[in-house]
Image (spheres, rainbow, N blue to C red):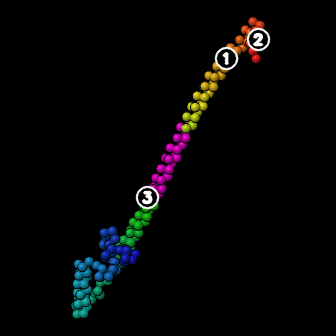
Amino acid sequence: MGDATRGVYGAVNGAAAYSPVPSHGLPWRLRMAEEAGRSREEKATKHGSGGSHPPTQPHTMVDRTLEGTMDGILQEILAVGRRLEGMDNAITSLTAETKSMRLDIADFQSRVTGLVQRVTTVEGNITTFQDRDQELFYLRSKLIDLEDRSRRDNVSFFRFQ
């Protein structure tokens, strides 16, 4: 991971890790301590005092391992963020689909209500037709009775045609 994506001195989510960020990017206290350490090492090597060991390397294997671990953790955090963003998009899509389904259900319910009203109207018409049919049956039976009486009385019912 490049220096541009890290914090001032290798900070990843608040945890400080040594990074090959140039000294001018470090906070002033660290920079001062680093310069003081360098000047002590330079004096020791120039004057021959300070022992036989070479100056310390700023990047040990532990530092590299720690930096790799921090980079891995940061990559995992970014991957989880992308997954969460995908889930958020999916939830938004499902919410929109649910609203659409609710509208479809409401439309279906209104259509069913309309059909029930039509069936009720048809049932009312059938009842009316049945009532009229009964009335017609009654009138027909009365007419037949009148015809029978007229035949008995030998009077033509339809004489005035």
Left or right: 13, with 39 as reference point: right
Give the label on residue 139, or none. 1
Q: Residues within 10 Å of mark 3 (few under 14, many from 20)?
A: few
Sequence-earlier tag: 2 or 1 = 1
Residue 6 is at least partly visible in this image = yes
The stretch of residues the image draws in magenta is 88-113
Question: Does the magenta run of residues contain 15?
Answer: no
Task: Give the main secondary structure, helix, strand or loop, of the magenta stretch.
Answer: helix
Give the label on residue 88, or none. 3
**Spatial separation of the CA atoms under disc 2 and disc 3:** 93 Å
Q: Write the residue at 37% across / 74% down.
A: 5
Q: Nearer the viewer, residue 2 or 43?
A: 2
**Spatial separation of the CA atoms under disc 3 and disc 1:** 76 Å
Q: Nearer the viewer, residue 161 or 6?
A: 161
Q: Which quadrant would residue 119 be assigned to in this image?
A: top right
Q: Write the residue at 52% across / 47% down.
A: 104
Residue 73 at x, y = what percent?
A: 38, 68
